[in-house]
Amino acid sequence: MAETTPVLEIRDLCIDFRTQHGVARAVEKLSFSIGAREILGLVGESGSGKTISMLASVGLINDPNAMISGSIRYKGRELIGLSGRALRHVRGREIAMIFQDPMTAMTPVHSIGWQIVEQIQAHEAISWKAAKLRAIDLLGMMGMPSPATQFDRYPHQLSGGLRQRAMIAMALSCDPSLLIADEPTTALDVTVQAQILALLEKLRRDFNSSIILITHDMGVVAQIADRVMVMYAGRLVERGTTQDVFAHPGHPYTQGLLAAIPPIEGPKPRRLAAIPGTPPSPGAMPPGCPFEPRCVLRFAACDERPKLMPRGAQDVACFLPASAAP
Amino acid sequence: MLPASECGALTRHLLEAVALSKRFAVRGRVLHAVDTITLRVMRGETLGLVGESGCGKSTLGRCLLRLQNPSDGAIIFDGIDITHLSMRAMRALRPRMQMVFQDPYGSLNPRRRVGDLIAEPLRVHADDGRRRDAAAIADRIGALVDLVGLKREHLQRYPHEFSGGQRQRIGIARALALDPDLVVADEPVSALDVSVQAQVINLMMDLQERLGLTYVFIAHDLAVVRQIATRIAVMYLGSVVEIGPTADVFASPLHPYTAALLEAVPKLAASHTGKTPMGGDVPSPIDPPTGCRFHPRCGRAQLRCKEERPPLAPLAGIRQVACHFPL
């Protein structure tokens, strides 16, 4: 979708951390782009590198032990190497990020309205009064009941769902063209999750936003993403349209992940198809394919590291010939 | 296990809650965390307790084991009314009723080795007439480690050296150390990644088959509960709104809330259904709505729902629903 004019384009992003035991690679050669009005799902288990790669994309990694290389272009403009000041103009105004737990992303000592106004005034020369009107407007658009009243409330006075709506309102206050949502519904109950997912779809429709949705929940991705990228141990192992990836997953890990989910409808398996073992830690990465130790289909070629290559309708990082793929 | 004569009549149910309530005082007001719940847990079954956060499922689970004392009502465990049992009498029963927690890290002492952690319940309950010497304890630990799929060399390690899934295996080994009849598991897999979650669910199902365990399985993930539970109780604002065999409840929910909950679960078979999700949030249990607690969010609500609270009533034989106008 709209590959010709990517909003964000990432090439060969590597993130290394200096540790006591040498350098640990958290993300290896991540490359992808997201087009206008696209919802891109980034899935993987905890520690797969999905959050850290997105934090790096917006310059939010402060760790002096982190080494970031590669290229991150926002609408053609290189972000890596940009000064903090220049980056602040992009961040918030052009690219906004929302997090799993709004409680940690908001300050408890100011009302949610105050925080949204502060955000607007940080990026625009606008009066308090005008900014307040816009904030109330935004809260209303995010589905907050009686937004003028909610404006004066503090984060702890809101339910989890309303808090997440307030944070989305804050993220959208400067009309960014890219929204990075990191597990936005993970802390929410399932009925509230459905409301927030509907809201994200509305953002794309009404605000023309592109959305990168980071989640571990395959169901959430199936529901709203156009394309999906699967990460494992810091590497992209599969990429394709949501329809293709769910209908015929190409990588044994994607296949295993889908099979391990207990079904919510249809016949119930006697036992779930669990993937044996656990993901490798960044300090102890297998020399070959990172999934090799857990893979039931491994063979001699897996001692080397596979590259992401086109196979069928999607891209897969696996040596298995297409005919033998799961 | 106690001799049959002490168990009272051998009933089909192992555990029974009768009009159980738990109230908390919050800033001078009363919060009904568990509101007059009556249910039975059958021997050898898994009763799934589902509901959104704050619905009282964890409080109910803790009350069933008397980790919290109920405000009202009774808990009958294997024919014994344990509601007002003394600490001492409870302690004698504790080996038979155990709990598995969501965060095994929070319930495992970080300064003790795994071997000691699993041995702890055996040592604490050394005075229960089943006196154990060091060799017997070592044997039992070895058996438990095999049972939950850990390795013997793990016994010398500390909790932080384990992944979440392995830590949950340690938590399960501890719970099973004293050969319980009943295990209440509070969100045991919700902190785990999906590939590891499947391992732990399979383990719990295997253990149930091998040891004849009875589970109360508390979870917010409906797909997980569907996989493991024989019967399912759906809670909303402190009450059970529907209870019945898992397959029936999932195939044809009777309560509008159950239906809305099922509808809200994202499906893998992608479908941009465009259905409008149910609006609103769960109301505060301090100030619950009148009548049926669900009526402000219910598309089928009528005047009667606002005025009169529907009791949990039998419907279609083995099912129960608390609704004036069931689906």
Image (cartoon, helix red, strand yellow):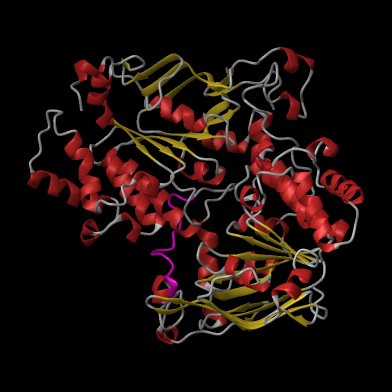
Task: Measuring from the top left, give residue B258's x and y in whole percent.
Answer: 63, 33
Q: Is residue A15 above or below residue A207?
A: below
Task: Measuring from the top left, give residue B236's x and y in whole percent.
Answer: 60, 28
Apparent side of residue A177 relative to residue B36 in the rendered image (left or right):
right
Q: Is residue A297 visible?
A: no
Residue depicted at 37% across the width and 77% down the height: A21
Q: Is residue B208 above or below residue A297?
A: above
Q: Is residue B64 above or below residue A44?
A: above
Q: Which residues are magenta?
A: A269-282
Residue depicted at 85% across the width and 38% down the height: A148
Apparent side of residue A170 relative to residue A304 in the rendered image (left or right):
right
Q: Is residue B56 magenta?
A: no
Residue B14 occupies which quadrant of the picture? top left
Residue B133 occupies which quadrant of the picture? top left
Residue depicted at 28% across the width and 46% down the height: B173
Task: Measuring from the top left, give residue A181's x and y in whole percent.
Answer: 69, 59
Task: Measuring from the top left, give residue A210's x and y in whole percent.
Answer: 78, 65
Residue A249 occupies which quadrant of the picture? bottom right
Q: Is residue A71 visible?
A: yes
Q: Quadrant of the C terminus of chain B?
A: top right
Q: Is residue A276 magenta?
A: yes
Q: Quadrant of the N terminus of chain B?
A: top left
Main SS of the magenta segment?
A: loop
Q: Nearer the viewer, residue A132 or A196?
A: A132
Counting labels gives: 0
Q: Nearer the viewer, residue A52 or B54?
A: A52
Q: Nearer the viewer, residue A40 or A142?
A: A142
Residue depicted at 42% across the width and 25% down the height: B63
Apparent side of residue B193 relative to residue A86 in the rendered image (left or right):
left
